[in-house]
Amino acid sequence: MNDSTDPLADALTETLPVLLTALEAMEVAQQAFHPARPERVITFLEPYFEPLKQAQARLAPLSFPVHVEKFGSQLKTAFTYAVRTAENYQLAATSPESGMRAGRTLSKARAHLFPLATLLNPIHQFFLEPSLRNQAQISERWQQEPLTSPFVHVENDYDQRGGASIFVPHWLDPDQAAPVVIALHGGTGHGRDMLWSWVREARSRGFVVIAPTSQDQTWQLHHPEQEMPAILALIEFVAQNTQIDRSKIMLTGMSDGATLTLQLGLAQSSPFTHLAPFSGTLDPALVESGAIAEAQNKSIYLVHGSQDWMFPVEVGKMTHQVLEAFNHHMIYREVEGLGHAFARSELPRLLPWFSDALMLES
């Protein structure tokens, strides 16, 4: 940059690490949040709040040159949502729903930051798994500008229900079939938010993520068969433009999405080769109807938090016991300290289990 832009360069150098560090901390807080004990998360995040606001205040009045004006707008908006996330967590002491709302604003912060990943190495590294972040420069594979956005939102704005958000890493080899992860949100959730639980890993390892949004506030758990056609249509929609590996299609979900994962995954002729329910419940109808026997034909990875405040860990243990009677090779992971939240920390183990092709080089 020339002399006139040096103050801007200095501001970016000093404020960007503050933003990225705060976002990382808030991702950790998202897993640990407990509505009855928000003070633990608030205390953990307190050192990041004031530096984040100060960094935003420093960047806000600065003007970006015309050729990077869009870059500046994206970055400032990411700061806005990051600060809003911090404020939501601060309010959680008196308003538990604010703590839940923080997940939405955190997703929006990441969504505005992601387009800058091919421009600045720190942002690029933020959207990679930690073991890949030691590169001095952005590698050619990730640096190339995508011809089209890696995101597709099918009638899935935040004020819409029944659509889906899709992420296809732009660097996928078109001649090589890619694994597919279908990620189902929990009750009152949204596919746009659920997608961000998987983007970093998908970008790092190379798989497709499909995150549908339920028609209503949650899935039709009393009539799960009604959810199947839309999900199958989404798989075919992606297959029109991306070569997918039909031997590696994982259905996964959080909370109500986990319950639906087992309902659909254990249906006869289900196309899902792997099932990964996170922090859900087992529908008794699966046992009563005998559909539970289909578990013997599936690869199953069950996850539950030891401190789950919605569905106590005993629910996970019971589900494991019932499923294991039909599938001795299934995996059950109880995550110590995890509340009712998506166990993102489990993905480094889950993904190589799902597909050998998704193992990161050590």
Image (cartoon, grey):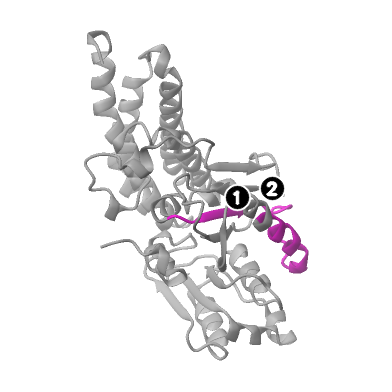
> In this picture, is 12 found above or below 64?
below
Name the disc covering residue 23, or none: none
SS for callout 2: loop
Q: Residues within 10 Å of mark 2 (few under 14, many from 20)?
A: many
Magenta stretch holds residue 222: yes
Query: Which residue appears farthest toward the top when viewing the image?
Result: 4
Q: CA distance from mark 1 to mark 2?
A: 8 Å
Task: Give how far across and how far down residue 313 sits, in percent.
Answer: 48, 74
Residue at screen point 62% across, 73% down: 262
Seen from the viewer's position, the closer of residues 196 and 219 is: 196
Picture quarter with the N terminus? top left
Magenta stretch holds residue 159: no
Q: Residues within 10 Å of mark 1 (few under 14, many from 20)?
A: many
Task: Give how far across and how far down residue 115 sits, in percent.
Answer: 45, 34
Q: Which residue is mark 1?
A: 191
Task: Classify residue 94 as left or right of residue 68.
Answer: right
Start-end of magenta stretch:
206-234
Task: Classify residue 317 as left or right of residue 256.
Answer: left
> In this picture, is 319 found above or below 171?
below
Residue at screen point 46% across, 42% down: 106
Task: Classify residue 350 as left or right of residue 224.
Answer: left
Q: Which residue is mark 2?
A: 163
Q: Quadrant of residue 359?
A: bottom left
Query: Considering only order in the chain, which callout, 2 or 1, is on the residue closer to the N terminus?
Result: 2
Q: Quadrant of residue 220?
A: bottom right
Picture quarter with the C terminus? bottom left
Q: Tell whether label 2 touches label 1 (CB within 8 Å).
A: yes
Residue at screen point 42% across, 54% down: 201
